[in-house]
Image (cartoon, grey):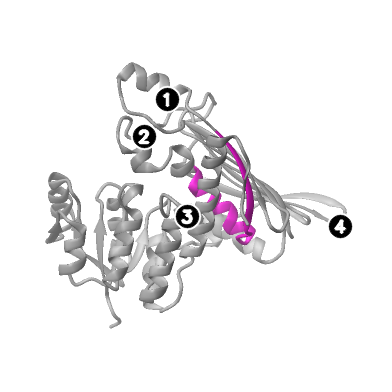
Amino acid sequence: MGKTIRVGVVGLGMGRAHIEGYRRHPGCEVVAIADVDAKRLAECGDKYGIAQRYADAAAMFREAELDAVSIAVPNKFHCPLTLAALRRGLHVLCEKPMAMTVAEAESMKRAADKAKRNLMLNFSFRFTNASFALKQQVAAGVIGDVYFGRTVWHRRRGLPGFGGWFGNKEMSGGGPLIDLGVHRIDLALWLMGHPEPVAVSGSAYNVIARERARREKKLYTVEDMACGLVKFRNGATLIVEASWALNINENEHMVTALYGDKGGLVQRNVSGSYEFVAELYTEEGGNLYTKRLDNACVPAPSAYHEFIASILEKRPPLAPAEHGIKVQKILNGLYQSAETGREVVYA
């Protein structure tokens, strides 16, 4: 029988999804959990039968016999906890966004390289059947060279944990752009082959949430909608849009559309749900075709399965640190541009 990867999970809000994901992989076991909330720690430990429970993540890294950890805490703590885990020789799956700044993200990659451990980002929206089916077609050259795209996640009214850390810029680094837009930016970059961003121009707004925060006397220091334009070294352009509160029809509207010299593609959600479809648009023999991909034909692993598989197979993960750094450059560039009113240009 092969090696079993012993996993610890830090943060038991989103971390519960991590535990569930790991439980579906026969090659790993969640043996320890950590959270500053004693009630949540006890409830989660009892539910999943996990005996090793820690109020302090550093103590878990130090005392528990672990091979890997999931970091699923507020964004402010992604970098310090990842660095602490890597110093202990642990592989790390970090929630998105990678960090608060590009400098933090780069320090995380350097630490992973030094420790010779895998650092993977939980960019879960690329780990879907629809996304993998499209990636297969892109790799086959069906749409050719991408020169333009648009990637979007809007909500009609979906402000998470209103009054909590999501709306506190000091803890989160931003609002829907860093929370939702991060997924759609990553998906677009992955399908585009990760071109290098060279210039970013963005705008951010706090219109609907600001009024609600005023009425309810809640802390809210981030945007409720952001948008921007990203230019890449290869000449391609990407439009980015993200909102928690926007006057639209659907409760959830997600779409990533890319256009190449041979064809186009789209991955979008269905009727405001978390079910996705994928389509291709091509010209063949002078005729125009629209092709709906059968997602069941291309089963995708979950991010948790991929993380464990990368460790067992001693290879880099499919969502490595360098991908996270490019996404971070775009996020921070859009926020900086929105604040200054100027385009951000990278050397």
Say the numbered circle drawn on residue 285. Answer: 4
SS class, disc 3: helix
x and y, in percent, of residue 242 in the image: 52, 37
Q: Is residue 269 above or below residue 249?
A: below
Q: Are marks 1 and 4 in contact (CB under 8 Å)?
A: no
Q: Provide the residue designation for mark 1.
A: 209
The tag earlier along the polypeptide, 3 or 1, is: 3
Residue 187 among those drawn in magenta = yes
> Could you tell me the amino acid type at mark 4?
Gly
Q: Is residue 269 visible?
A: no
- Residue 167: mark: 2
| For marks 3 and 2 on the same chain, the one whose residue lies earlier in the sequence | 3
Query: Which quadrant of the structure image shows residue 27?
Result: bottom left
Q: CA distance from mark 3 to mark 4?
A: 46 Å
Of circles 1 and 4, the one toward us is: 1
Give, as a three-letter code, the residue at label 2: Gly
Q: Could you tell me how far apart the alpha carbons at marks 3 and 2 are, in whole angstroms?
A: 21 Å
Q: Please identify, in this view, whether the residue under mark 3 or under mark 4 is nearer the observer.
A: 3
Per the image, is 192 magenta? yes
Query: Which residue is painted at 33% across and 42% down in the image?
Result: 171
List x then y, in percent, for residue 293.
Answer: 62, 54
Circle 3 residue: 102
| Residue at 41% in and 57% down | 104
